Amino acid sequence: SSVPAPVPSLACLVPPFLLRGGACSSMRCARLVTGVLLALSCLLCRGIGRGAMPVQNEIIMQSGKEAASLERDGTVQVVSDVDDTIKSSGNLRCLGIPLGGVDAQYKRNTFYPGVMQFAIEIARGGNDKIRDIPRLAVLTARAREFKFALELSNSSVINRNYHLAGQANGLTDWGIGRVLYGSVKEWIFQDLKADRKFKNFNRLQRELPPSAAFVFIGDTGEKDERAATMIAKKFESKILAVFLHAVSEEGRVAKLPHDREIRHKSGDKTPVLYFRTYVGAAQKAYQIGLMNEAGVKRVIKSSKSALRGVPKQSTQWQDLLEDIKAAKDSMAPFRISQFYF
């Protein structure tokens, strides 16, 4: 309500906090328009490179700002899948059935670079002063009948790593919290995985305050997309965003699916955002107001650190460096526009 009518069409070039607040003076409005125009000029001068977002994605990013804000109230619960989302399944199979996922780019059980830092930054929502965020909730297709071997206990490697990541960020009691499992039935009948995760999400949300909002992180390999769509259609604006890690049994994903949005009867929309690396996910989170610039930089730092020792000519580094460049390019016009306020 405080922004003049001509500005919203270019709002994707302006940091989210500039689109909120009280009454706007004529001078501030003029500076806003000037900053946006200069930012647009910067984009045009850079040209349409690999790092530039397609127009369709810009529209989705803008719609995401309507559902997400750096100044959120209430709990924001990050909900994640495990295999091919937190760590790679390595495309290991038994009798032709994937044992957890299909990703062949990373070796089995390799943690994806930046995955833990990304979850922390999303839960913080751009507020670096927060020292108490909800533990990560997990919806996994792992069979509860095999919990003796697959349980995500406090002593598990995954939980220990998440706890250490929390400590490194000043979060003394952070790690993996609620874990909801699948069953052998879904392992045999793969199409049932989405239904199981949908039912488990219903259980999870009943355990949290009514004001809680959610961000879902999954992958494109094993029904997470369908599960996320079912969840978003039921809970609408409570689902701030869906992030899907693009994976393939062929190795590197050559082309990302187009970002899209799930439209709700209320008029709200939930953005569905695809990524190769967690730096790419962080860039898109920044674009819709779920993460600040400092958070993106921390995800970049964490991701680069995780790939130490991996050959620079690998597809892992290729993807990461491309996403780092895109992230830096997307943040540049914001810094220019901020100079005029």
Image: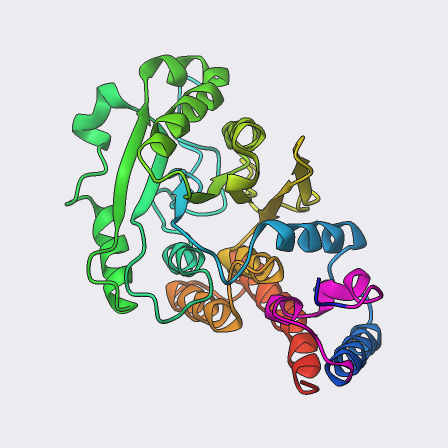
In the image: residue 236, left or right of residue 7? left
* Residue pictured at 67% horizontal, 87% vertical: 339
Q: Is residue 333 left or right of residue 84?
A: right
x, y (%) of residue 187? 38, 18
Q: Which of 39 and 194 is in front in this view?
A: 39
Q: In the image, residue 203 lies at what x, y percent?
A: 35, 26
Total residue callouts: 0
Describe residue 138's horizontal placement relative to residue 286 as left or right.
Answer: left
Q: Residue at x 56, y 38 (%)?
A: 248
| Residue drawn at 28 percent across, 61 percent down | 165
Q: Against 337, is 181 above or below?
A: above
Is residue 58 one of those drawn in magenta?
no
For the question of whether residue 113 can be seen, the reply is no
Q: What is the x, y in percent for residue 245?
A: 53, 44
Spot the residue most to the front: 23
- Res. 138 image quadrant: top left
Depth check: give the residue in front, 168 or 32: 32
Q: Is residue 300 above or below residue 112?
A: below
Q: Position of residue 144 (x, y in %)?
A: 25, 22
Residues 256 and 96: in front is: 256
Q: Tell me: residue 214, above or below residue 329.
A: above
Rendered-image quadrant of the C terminus: bottom right
**Residue toward you, 186 or 202:** 202
Left or right: where 173 falls relative to 294:
left
User: Would you say residue 333 is visible in this rendering?
Assistant: yes
Q: Quadrant of residue 330?
A: bottom right
Residue stretch in magenta: 4-26
| Colour logic | rainbow
